[in-house]
Image (spheres, rainbow, N blue to C red):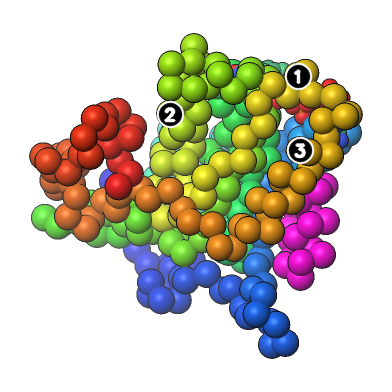
Amino acid sequence: MDAAPLNDARGSVEDRRPPIEAHADSKEFHMKVLIVYAHPEPRSLNGSLKDLAVKTLESAGHEVQVSDLYGMKWKAVLDAEDYGPSASSPLKVAADSGTAFDTGTLAPEVKAEQEKLLWADTYIFQFPMWWYTMPAILKGWVDRVFTYHFAYGVGEHSDVKYGERFGEGTLLGKRAMLSVTAGGPESHYSDRGINGPIDDLLFPIHHGILYYPGIEVLPPFVLYGTDRTTDEDYPDIAKAWEHRLENLESADPIPFRRQNFGDYEIPSLHLKEGLEPAGRSGFGLHSR
Ligand SMILES: Cc1cc2nc3c(=O)[nH]c(=O)nc-3n(C[C@H](O)[C@H](O)[C@H](O)COP(=O)(O)OP(=O)(O)OC[C@H]3O[C@@H](n4cnc5c(N)ncnc54)[C@H](O)[C@@H]3O)c2cc1C
C-alpha cells in the first residue's frame, strides 16, 4: 500500500504523544479512557466488569467514554454505505475507505469512533472470548473504524521504511488493554494446553490490530473458567480488576519490536538473524 497523504489525524510524533495531564493538586495522572464493550447482556459478567471499570476509573479522576456496541446497535459489517459518495463501483474497500477518510465522508458513526480514539489516550476492550477471538460485532468495529489512511496505509515506503506501522502510526502514544473472559480453565490456555497459549491467541489482536497503527499494548486481563464463575467468586474478581485498573497508567507494555528501527530486513520484514532470544519461536519472535 502506498504512502498516505497527511491528514488532520496526524501530526508530528511529539503531537501524538498521549495527552495525559497531571492534576494541578496531586501526583496522580488524568487519563482519558475509551472502553469498547461487546456483550449483548448488560447483566452479564462482561457487563459487570465494564460497569466496575467506569466506576473505578471515574472515582480515580479519569475521564471515561464507553462504546457499548450492542447498546449502540453497531452495524457489524463493513459495506459501501460506510463510504457515502466515496464508494466506487465496483467497491474498492481499502481505497474507498481512504478517500472517505480524507474527504470527511465516512459514515457519521465511524467518524465518531475515530474521534473517540483520537480523544482517548487509553483504550480498554471488554469482551468474552468467542471461538478463540473477539465477538463479531467488535471485529466489525475494527473493520469499519480502522480505515485506510487512519489506521493503515500511513507513511512513506522507502529502503529504510515500510510505512508507519508497528511502533509508528496514527495512534502512536496511545495505550490499550484487553479485558477478556474465557469459558475454558487456565490450564487449557497454558503452553501445553489444548487451546494454545493465551498470548498466541491474542497476538492477532494485540499485534495485528492494536500495535499495527502504533498503539502500545498492555498485558491483558484474562478471567478463565468464567462459565463456572459464581456470585461468591465475584468479590475476588472485582478486587483483581480494580487493582489492574488502578495500576493502568504505570503498567509496562508488551515489548513488541518496532518495524522500522533495525530489527527487521526491509522489504522482506524478516527478523534479522541472531536477534531471537534462545528458544524463542513463532509469535514470540516479535517481542524483545
Ligand atoms: C459463541 C461462543 C463461543 C465461545 N467460544 C469460546 C472459546 O473459544 N474459548 C473459551 O474459553 N470459551 C468460549 N466460550 C465461552 C465464553 O467465553 C464464556 O461464556 C464467556 O466468557 C462468559 O462471559 P459472560 O459475560 O458471557 O458471562 P455470564 O454468562 O454473564 O456470567 C458467567 C458467570 O458469572 C457469574 N457471575 C458472578 N458474578 C457476576 C456478576 N457480578 N455479574 C454477572 N455475572 C456474574 C454468572 O452468574 C455466571 O454464572 C464461548 C461462548 C460462546 C457463546
**4 or 27: nearer the eye?**
27
Disc 1 marks which residue? 227
Mark 1 sits near ligand 1, with its Cβ under 8 Å away? yes
Residue located 50% across and 28% down the image: 198
Instruction: Specify the segment rendered in magenta.
Output: 51-67
- How many C-alpha atoms fall within 10 Å of the one at disc 2: few (<14), some, or many (≥20)? some
Compared across the picture, whether 212 is left or right of 160 comes to right
Q: Is residue 183 visible?
A: yes
User: What is the three-letter code of the residue carrying label 2?
Assistant: Asp
Mark 1 and mark 2: Cα distance apart in space = 22 Å
Residue located 23% across and 51% down the image: 162
Compared across the picture, whether 98 is left or right of 284 comes to right
User: What is the three-letter code of the residue carrying label 1?
Assistant: Asp
Residue located 59% across and 23% down the image: 186
Numbered tag placed on residue 237 in the rendering: 3
Front disc: 1 or 3: 3
Compared across the picture, whether 237 is left or right of 43 comes to left
Q: Earlier in the sequence, mark 3 or mark 2?
A: 2
Disc 2 marks which residue? 200
Q: Are marks 3 and 2 in contact (CB under 8 Å)?
A: no
> Residue 223: horizontal and vertical position, in percent?
67, 32
- How many C-alpha atoms fall within 10 Å of the one at disc 1: few (<14), some, or many (≥20)? few
**172 or 91: nearer the eye?**
172
User: What is the three-letter code of the residue carrying label 3?
Assistant: Ile
Vertically, is 90 above or below 164? Answer: above
